[in-house]
Amino acid sequence: MRQPLALGGAAVVGIGIGFVLSGGIRGAGAGGEAPGADFPMAIQQAWFPPVSDYDTGGEPLDDERFDALMSALDGALTAQATLADFEREADIHLWSLTRRLAVPSVTDAQMEQIRTYLDELAEAHPDHREVIEYRRTFLPSYATSRPEAPPLTFDLQLFGDGDRYPNNGEPFTDAQVEELLGTLDAIVNLPEVAPHLEREAGTPFWRFGGRLQRGQVDEEQAARIGTYFDNLMEAHPDAAEFLGRQRFLVENLTPGRVAPNIVGTDTEGAEFALEDYRGKVVALIFSGQWCGPCRGEYPYQRAMLDIFDEEEVALLGVNSDARLETIQRAKEDEGLDYRTWWDGHSQPDAEAVAADGPIATQWGVRGWPTIYVIDDQGVIRFVNKRGGALIDAVDQLLRDQRMREYQERTGTTVSPNRPVRALIVPAQPAQPVSEEGNRK
């Protein structure tokens, strides 16, 4: 049976606001600390039985393993490391409970026991009731015999504040690249991550790549990243295929890299390739009618078709709807008159969403919409510009292209981003004005 809730008389220090409500954890390595030093204690040590102990294949969870889980939760939530920053630490401990209930079938009695525990927890920590209730809300949806447990790092923002890194294609400094690599390394060596890299580390690698996609790394920095992946693959030979996919994304889908070619069939069944559009600025849009934020981009896409109608610009889509007729009808109804690969053909059993198509998989797409802006030379220049920012990005590449063509024609070497000095006209002596108001 579950141990009593041992919270009476404990001194609780609530520092700041919780992880879920604030949207993240303080930046890893902030203030000169080693990357990972500021990670919550809830992930720096193993507090719970292994996730594999709860992989029952959907069979009921026996009382022995359930009691062990609840005992571990109680121990974690009453530890001094948790009480020192309850909001942040407790949220992750409750997530650790939830993810272990994702695969087995949880009985009504067990679920009621969890609810009673959370009621007592909320009473003991009234200032943190909101984060407790947040996690309680998700319990029923996760405890539904899923095929596998969600990863520990699924919703943890461990790479710090994005404003500390480039956000608009600027170059990374060596220190920034080293910090990102250090943070990634700290994550992959967490006790619940290292033994099961492929299952647990997909999200951190995706976030690492996403950070790199906001700026530009030079060749030496790229080589440093490549060396890190070499060492990682040597240390984790069983995860070599997984790490190879992550490496491909970092080395091929960041600004400054030539975009991998795409070959597939459009919504009318005709084959075409991304390389067919060399010489044009391309907005490559991974989208789906099932995706609300994707549909929110439609007005901007229609505007681009109008604004750039006579320019060397192409909008190209990669669609992830499960049914071909869905995107065909959407293109007609929404006025999306641009060519689109249908990527859902490889998932014939999908009902609405076919997000694991070959193109989306090759490009490592995990969030929709994902948008790449590619210049006329086939080089990725911007990633995930949306709305008006996407229009501005395409316009900037057109200006750059015109300036480059001008320089080639005239032999000048003016940078397209170089500020233009104001032309100062010497002041002229004032002329006398007649009573009628006319200058003499």
Image: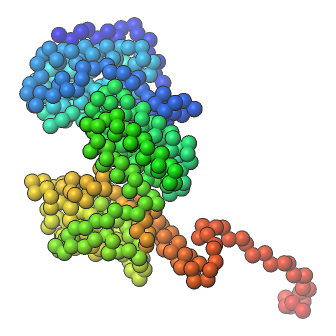
x, y (%) of residue 349?
9, 54
- Residue 318 visible in image: yes
Q: Is 54 or 183 nearer to us in this picture?
A: 183
Total labels: the figure holds 0
Which color scheme is applied? rainbow
Quadrant where the N terminus sits is: top left
x, y (%) of residue 375?
44, 69
On screen, residue 65 above or below 417: above
- Residue 153 visible in image: no
Q: In the visual, does 129 lie left or right of 222?
A: left
Residue at 50% from the left image edge and 75% from the top image edge: 401
Q: Quadrant of residue 369?
A: bottom left
Q: Is 337 or 405 nearer to us in this picture?
A: 405
On screen, residue 212 above or below 58: below
On screen, residue 101 above or below 387: above
Residue at 43% from the left image edge and 80% from the top image edge: 311
Quadrant where the C terminus sits is: bottom right
x, y (%) of residue 241?
26, 45
Q: Is 80 or 235 nearer to us in this picture?
A: 235
Residue at 24% from the left image edge and 23% from the top image edge: 50
Q: Quadrant of residue 105?
A: top left
Q: Quadrant of residue 277?
A: bottom left
x, y (%) of residue 216?
49, 55
Q: Is 51 or 436 nearer to us in this picture?
A: 51
On screen, residue 340 above or below 148: below
